């Protein structure tokens, strides 16, 4: 196969930021995706109706006439039923960050016990919970350690749809099957790189993200799930742009900017493994079923041709900058 047409590709985990950065990156996602789940970890987190409405407008302005549905999330905190009732139809879920675990998550969850009231409201209102699943322990074990929290959550709230965001380990892939109400997103970069690519040679700041890339056997387990379009797994880029000076710095910010390269690189990867037939399911169909959404109609065609990833998009460096991909978008 040298061409593939995708129907309404979706990015189920995306950071668009705000202000000038939003204006720079949002059109790049909107060009290639029919919609995306928008993360709420702005400097002041999106955690009330007013901020949500303002953010939706800002995104719509940045995207212009492009067909692109922003599926919004609220930042997890203690919410009342009344507060959530007012936003229920404007959001796809609530995103939970353990306090301090990543960029702009200082106001995240301090204790699971204290969060139970809100979690049970989410369950009753059928609002999915999206989780950054890392503990505060040793960096390579953070996801594995958090599985016990997923276990408690999934057991205590069996009707709550829980999305394990950007999973990076073999254990997390296996864990998906342990509870009916667990689902997951997988990024492009975790299908391609391991810790060796980040820190095995010269330190690669543009490959530094959270959760950090793990071992080859972890990557292989993620690959197997994605290439087989495991029904509980969706594509979520976790594209997280930071200005170049924040990446190429002694305190490098976590985040990989992959939005503009995701589709060509996924096509290349799926083609390489003879799995192109499963790309539609991974990139859109599973998400439609899991979230029960009908994205706007939009088709994106990719073809086998060499495409060179640019050195930068303005002041942001993309994933795999200045390398060649063997698949490109048909304009
Ligand atoms: O690498 C990451 N960057 N991981 C996250 O969880 C947050 C994201 C960001 O917002 O920069
Ligand atoms: Zn993220």
Image (spheres, rainbow, N blue to C red):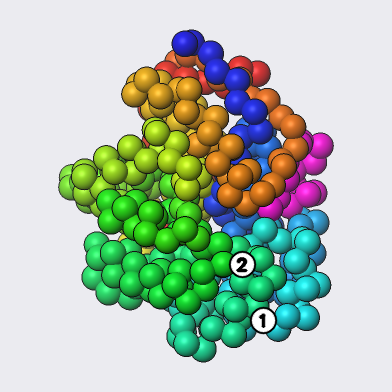
The reply to whether dot 2 and dot 1 touch (C-beta < 8 Å) is: yes
Specify whether residue 314 is painted magenta. no
In the rendered image, residue 134, in percent from the top left (x then y), is placed at 37, 68
Say if 301 sits above or below 111 in the image.
above
**Pointer 2 or 1: first along the chain:** 1
Q: In the figure, is residue 313 to the left or right of 265?
A: right
The answer to whether residue 298 shows anywhere in this view is yes
- Residue 46, compared with residue 303, is above or below; it is below
- The structure residue drawn at horizontal position 76% and vertical position 57%, both measured from the top left corner, is 56
Q: CA distance from mark 2 to mark 1?
A: 10 Å
Label 1's element?
loop
Name the residue nearer the viewer: 284 or 40: 284
Q: Position of residue 3 (x, y in %)?
A: 53, 13
Where residue 276 is drawn, which disc sits there?
none
Outermost residue to the bottom:
114
**Classed neighbour count for the residue bearing mark 2: other residues with Cα under 10 Å, few (<14), some (14–19), many (≥20):** many
| Closer to the camera in the image, 109 or 207 | 109
Q: Quick one: 180 or 260, which is closer to the camera?
A: 180
* Residue appearing at x 47%, y 11% in the figure: 1
Quadrant in the picture for residue 64: top right
Q: Quadrant of the C terminus?
A: top right
The residue stretch that appears in magenta: 59-71
Whether residue 67 appears in magenta in the rendering, the answer is yes
- Which residue is identified by label 2? 94
Residue drawn at (45%, 36%) of the image: 229
| Residue holding disc 1 | 79
């Amino acid at each position: 196969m040298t061409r593939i047409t995708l129907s309404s590709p979706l990015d189920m985990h995306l950071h668009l930021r705000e202000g000038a950065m939003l204006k720079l990156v949002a059109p790049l996602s909107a060009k290639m995706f029919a919609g995306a789940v928008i993360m709420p970890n702005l400097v002041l987190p999106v955690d009330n109706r007013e901020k949500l409405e303002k953010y939706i407008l800002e995104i719509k302005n940045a995207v212009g006439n492009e067909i692109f549905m922003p599926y919004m999330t609220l930042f997890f905190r203690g919410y009342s039923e009344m507060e959530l009732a007012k936003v229920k139809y404007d959001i796809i879920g609530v995103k939970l960050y353990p306090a301090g675990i990543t960029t702009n998550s200082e106001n995240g969850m301090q204790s699971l016990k204290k969060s139970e009231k809100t979690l049970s409201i989410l369950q009753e209102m059928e609002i999915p919970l999206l989780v950054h699943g890392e503990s505060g322990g040793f960096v390579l074990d953070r996801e594995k350690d958090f599985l016990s929290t997923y276990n408690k959550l999934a057991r205590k709230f069996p009707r709550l749809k829980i999305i394990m965001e950007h999973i990076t380990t073999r254990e997390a892939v296996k864990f998906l099957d342990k509870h009916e109400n667990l689902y997951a997103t997988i990024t492009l970069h975790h299908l391609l790189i391991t810790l060796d690519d980040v820190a095995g040679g010269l330190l690669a700041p543009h490959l530094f993200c959270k959760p950090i890339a793990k071992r080859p056997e972890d990557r292989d387990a993620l690959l197997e799930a994605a290439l087989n379009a495991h029904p509980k797994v969706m594509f979520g880029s976790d594209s997280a742009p930071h200005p170049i000076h924040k990446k190429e710095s002694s305190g490098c910010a976590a985040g990989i900017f992959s939005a503009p390269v995701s589709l060509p690189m996924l096509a290349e990867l799926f083609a390489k493994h003879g799995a192109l037939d499963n790309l539609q399911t991974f990139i859109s169909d599973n998400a439609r079923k899991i979230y029960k959404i009908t994205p706007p109609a939009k088709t994106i065609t990719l073809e086998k041709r060499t495409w060179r990833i640019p050195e930068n998009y303005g002041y942001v460096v993309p994933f795999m900058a200045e390398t060649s991909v063997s698949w490109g978008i048909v304009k």
